[in-house]
Image (spheres, helix red, strand yellow):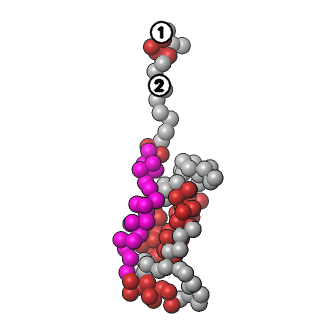
Amino acid sequence: MPTSKRESSKREPSKRKPSECKSEAIEYTKAVLALHAHADPRKAQVSRGYFKDAGEDVFLGVNVPTIRKLSRQFYLLPLADVRKLMWSQVHEERSLAHAILRLKFEKGPDAVPSYRALG
């Protein structure tokens, strides 16, 4: 019980986990820039050939092991930003979104602070 007005106005210590603070610093643009940094136009042409109907898709030429590595780096990305990646016309951005969601699923709801914010 606080004995004075001053003690009652003190803030309680933050109940956030250190990993939650990190997630606020990670942004959609950082994930996209990291992905684009690994782009290879020659591989992009080859990748495009694997799809019957690539349509309007844009290919960067980033290989799957690199996408998985980036997904481990950005798995704390908020779900709203993962959704932006999912709706991208860039094939590898959608692949990154899927890899991030797979990690979020594997680690479970306790490991991901924004797990319930799927709105």
Q: Amino acid at mark 2?
A: Arg
Coordinates of residue 30 in the picture (x, y in percent): 40, 60
Figure check: 36 above or below 11:
below
Coordinates of residue 37 in the picture (x, y in percent): 36, 71
Q: Which residues are magenta?
A: 21-40
Give the position of the N terminus as an image quadrant: top right
User: Circle 2 sits in a helix, a strand or a loop, which is it?
Assistant: loop
**91 within the magenta span:** no
The reply to whether discs 1 and 2 touch (Cβ–Cβ < 8 Å) is: no
Q: Label 1: few (<14), some or many (≥20) within 10 Å?
A: few
User: Circle 1 sits in a helix, a strand or a loop, which is it?
Assistant: loop
Q: Amino acid at mark 1?
A: Ser
Q: Earlier in the sequence, mark 1 or mark 2?
A: 1
Q: Residue at x 46, y 59 (%)?
A: 28
Secondary structure mostly seen in magenta is: helix
Q: Label 2: few (<14), some or many (≥20) within 10 Å?
A: few
Nearest the camera: 59 or 68? Answer: 59
Number of marks in picture: 2
Left or right relative to 83: residue 43: left
Coordinates of residue 57 in the picture (x, y in percent): 53, 80
Nearest the camera: 88 or 106? Answer: 88
Q: How far is disc 1 from disc 2 in space, using C-alphas?
A: 14 Å
Coordinates of residue 119 in the picture (x, y in percent): 63, 52
Residue at the disc numbered 1: 4
Q: Residue at x 54, y 48 (%)?
A: 113
Residue at the disc numbered 2: 11
Q: Residue furthest left?
A: 37
Figure check: 67 above or below 13:
below
